[in-house]
């Protein structure tokens, strides 16, 4: 969950007219959720928040009380279902030796097991152009508003507890009363771009008046846009190279690396390298069931967490490795990424970028094998078989 998650929520402005909550208020609301233990310091949703939503016990500080229904709607989309797991139902998943030691799985594994390294090249001019356009098209910046709040503090063994007792009406500040920070230095620290590049982005975007209106909100918006553009620029220019014939994930890792999961989150499997498939989402469960039922599938594996592809944004763990028998005359090898939606706009930009890196990694491995394993993004098995 990002600090700006609630910025678009409708509220009442100082003039009594509808207005977006804004970045500053959104950040305050995010900080409340963190202090209450409902999200962690990185914005990751905690089970306490899921429980509060399920039980209808979520409350917000008085300034945000009117926005509670809108906040709940956003949080429900982010939280997903509350899953209370019984530790007694956790079990170790064994390998299915007939599959693991078989020639079919060995042929599949030999095509995907090798490790790679990467180098990045990107067009600096194209990056600046993207940043300028994205900032120019960014959301509006509201005027800076101040609000005073009073609270009682009580200190006990459990720590410091606060209870708000009063708050003032929001006061809109005149632009001339706002102290202007050093935006170049601030954005340089947040984005690692040169001052010259930042200056060009700000001037050419035509939005410096927004900076005067609300400096902090504008800096946060500009930093987020620049860093997102950087991530995508890095991925667009990435090139992978296989390290060498001796650098790979050994097939024996399936036996030496323990795999365990909860009974309610796994299904029995006959064609898999493991006796059960552990799934995180319904999309994965459905895909595994389709793999088991389809006669064209010889063997497959839900790739374990230790199977990682390096990327500039952290490691990427693809979902599946699949061997398809085409009409009994040809074997086709696939690495499959399954998501409930494969539209880029529906995925977080970082997740989408990692998938793109995975695609480049397997494209490099494909140059060393014939037939090669192809990387496919799909939501169901039919979309994979359509590539055969």
Image (tube, helix red, strand yellow):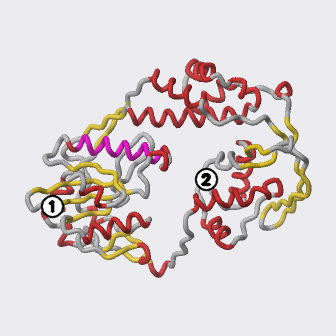
Above or below: residue 104 compared with residue 240: below
- Residue lying at 78% horizontally and 63% vertically, measured from the top left: 159
Residue at 30% in and 43% down: 361
Q: Which residues are magenta?
A: 350-365
* Placement of 68 over or under 193, stated as above or below: below
- Rendered image quadrant of residue 198: top right
Residue linked to disc 2: 43
Residue 274, compared with residue 365, is above or below; it is: below
Farthest residue to the bottom: give it. 88
Please name the residue that numbered disc 1 is placed on.
Answer: 325
Which of the numbered marks, if any, corresponds to residue 177?
none
Callout 1 environment at 10 Å: few (<14), some (14 to 19), or many (20+)?
some
Residue 140, picture quadrant:
top right
Distance of mark 2 from mark 1, alpha carbons?
44 Å
Q: Is residue 348 above or below residue 272?
A: above
Dot 2, crowdedness within 10 Å: few (<14), some or many (≥20)? Answer: some
Residue 180 in picture, x, y percent from top left: 77, 26
Looking at the rendered structure, the secondary structure element under dot 2 is loop
| Image point (14%, 48%), residue name | 371
Q: Is residue 158 magenta?
A: no
Image-based side of 278 in relation to 18, left or right: left
Q: Is residue 354 magenta?
A: yes
Q: Nearer the viewer, residue 89 or 28?
A: 28
Closer-to-camera residue (154/212): 212
- Element assignment for label 1: strand
Where residue 210 sits in the image (x, y, percent)? 71, 28
Label 2 vs label 1, nearer the camera: 1
């Amino acid at each position: 969950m990002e600090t700006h998650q609630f910025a678009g929520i409708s509220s009442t402005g100082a003039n009594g007219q509808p207005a977006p909550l804004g970045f500053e208020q959104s950040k305050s609301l995010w900080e409340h959720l963190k202090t209450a233990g409902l999200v962690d310091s990185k914005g990751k949703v905690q089970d306490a928040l899921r429980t509060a939503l399920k039980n209808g016990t979520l409350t917000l500080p008085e300034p945000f009380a009117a926005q509670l229904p809108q906040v709940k709607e956003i949080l429900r989309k982010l939280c997903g279902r509350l899953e209370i797991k019984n530790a007694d139902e956790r079990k170790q998943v064994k390998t299915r030796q007939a599959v693991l030691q078989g020639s079919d799985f060995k042929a599949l594994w030999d095509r995907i097991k090798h490790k790679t390294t990467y180098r990045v090249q990107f067009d600096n001019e194209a990056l600046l152009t993207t940043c300028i356009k994205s900032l120019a098209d960014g959301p509006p910046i509201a005027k800076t508003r101040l609000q005073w709040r009073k609270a009682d503090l009580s200190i006990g063994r459990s720590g410091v507890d606060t209870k708000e007792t009063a708050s003032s009406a929001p006061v809109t500040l005149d632009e001339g009363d706002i102290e202007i920070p050093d935006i170049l230095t601030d954005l340089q620290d947040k984005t690692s771009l040169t001052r010259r590049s930042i200056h060009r982005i700000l001037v050419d975007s035509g939005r410096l008046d927004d900076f005067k209106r609300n400096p902090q909100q504008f800096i946060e918006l500009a930093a987020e846009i620049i860093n997102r553009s950087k991530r995508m620029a890095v991925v667009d220019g990435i090139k992978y190279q296989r390290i060498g014939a001796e650098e790979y994930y050994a097939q024996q890792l399936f036996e030496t690396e323990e795999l365990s999961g909860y009974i309610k989150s796994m299904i029995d499997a006959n064609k898999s390298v493991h006796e059960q498939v552990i799934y995180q989402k319904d999309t994965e469960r459905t895909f595994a069931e389709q793999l088991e039922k389809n006669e064209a599938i010889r063997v497959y594996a839900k790739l374990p967490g230790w199977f990682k592809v390096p990327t500039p944004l952290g490691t990427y763990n693809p979902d599946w490795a699949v061997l398809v028998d085409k009409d009994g005359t040809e074997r086709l090898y696939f690495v499959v990424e399954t998501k409930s939606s494969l539209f880029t706009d529906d995925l977080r930009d970082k997740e989408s970028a990692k998938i793109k890196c995975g695609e480049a990694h397997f494209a490099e491995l494909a140059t060393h094998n014939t037939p090669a394993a192809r990387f496919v993004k799909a939501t169901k098995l039919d979309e994979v078989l359509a590539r055969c």
